[in-house]
Image (cartoon, grey):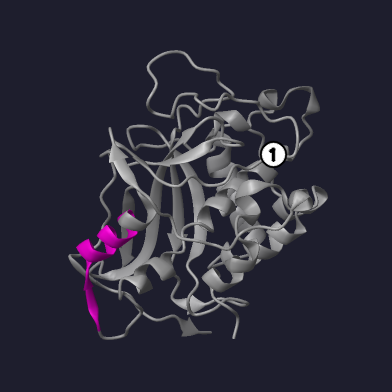
Amino acid sequence: MPTSLRAALAYASNLFSQTPLANLGPQPPHQAPIGASHDGGIYEQSPIAPYEPLTGAPSCPVNGPVSCHNNSAADACCFVHPGGRLLLTQFWDEKVHVGGSEEDWTVHGLWPDLCDGSFDQFCGMAPRFENITEVLEHYDQGELVEFMNRYWVANYGTNDHLWAHEYNKHATCINTLAPSCYGENYTPGLEVVDYFTRAFGLFKTLDTYWALANAGIEPDYKQMFPLAKIQATLEAFSGGRVILKCSGRHHNVLHEAWYVYFVQGSLQSGDFVPARDSFKGDQGNCAATVRYLPKRHK
């Protein structure tokens, strides 16, 4: 049987949050976030290791403003705006996908919502791309593609179609991915590498299955779980707000988890800062008690 997310990523830990795959060295094992503390609406925890873009991305100050927390002018290439509320969204699919395991939560996307919780889409701040696999492989990101084919999978259609949809709908609304932010070293596709590397790097720190199992919440056909316990568990794990989405006629089947972040600096090289504040759309659609069903084999 294929290994779980936490087992696979133990070998590839910090793989995608630090450097492009062509520049990898030995990395430490995967660990859950630790050491969280709340201050002024931003939840600070052990930082995700910095990612070093391939080339040409803006060089930003380490003490720059946090997205959605700045009332004065900021460098457009070092401050994510207006979509400064980043949501890393995950699926709990009904069936085990090809190459996956019964423990896999998978990536839905990385979405740049506006600070008030509304959102734009298909913005044109960055160029559109349809050939995501081709672009990533052109920049020697074959291992990233391999991991995406395991953990960023389409329920319908091809994975490449899903990736292009997510990129064109959401990444084009991230202003720091604009070609002008890369300067004279820009070549088409660098923004694709940066978006998928950073999204997958954040995902690999958020092992939802492990976090829930560690709290005694595991898939079961009969047991019902208090939604409040699931939400509190995942928010303690990530350090920030988590929006839960459910399927089923009574909205009582756990299906998605959306982790909410701000960014300090550019998407390319900034820090993800867990967000704790309230905003439009911060409530899920789940019933008070929910089912967390085991995956079925196709």
Label 1: state its secondary structure.
loop
Q: Residue furthest left?
A: 288
Q: Residues within 10 Å of mark 1 (few under 14, many from 20)?
A: some
Q: Which residues are magenta?
A: 223-235
Residue 179's image quarter? top right
Q: Residue at x 54, y 38 (%)?
A: 122
The amino acid pointed to by label 1 is Pro
**Magenta highlight: main SS:** helix
Residue occupying image coordinates x 69% and y 45%: 193
Q: Nearer the viewer, residue 132 or 4?
A: 4
How many marks on residues? 1
Image vertical order of residue 43 relative to residue 161, above or below: above
Residue underneath mark 1: 53
Residue at point 33%, 52% (across, down): 242
| Quadrant in which residue 100 is drawn | bottom right
> Residue 180: where, in percent of width, then height?
68, 23
Residue 82 or residue 26, whichever sits in front: 26
Residue at the outermost top position: 73
Residue shown at 35%/69% (left/top)? Answer: 212
Is 51 rendered above or below residue 28? above
Residue 102 position in % (x across, y down): 49, 80
Q: Is residue 125 visible?
A: no
* Magenta span contains residue 93: no
Whether residue 231 is in magenta: the answer is yes
> Which sits in the foreground, 2 or 26?
26
Q: Is residue 103 left or right of residue 150?
A: left
Can residue 266 be seen in the rendering of this structure?
Answer: yes
Residue 7 position, x and y percent, is 56, 73
Q: Is residue 77 above or below residue 247?
A: above
Question: On the rendered image, what quadrant is the N terminus found in?
Answer: bottom right
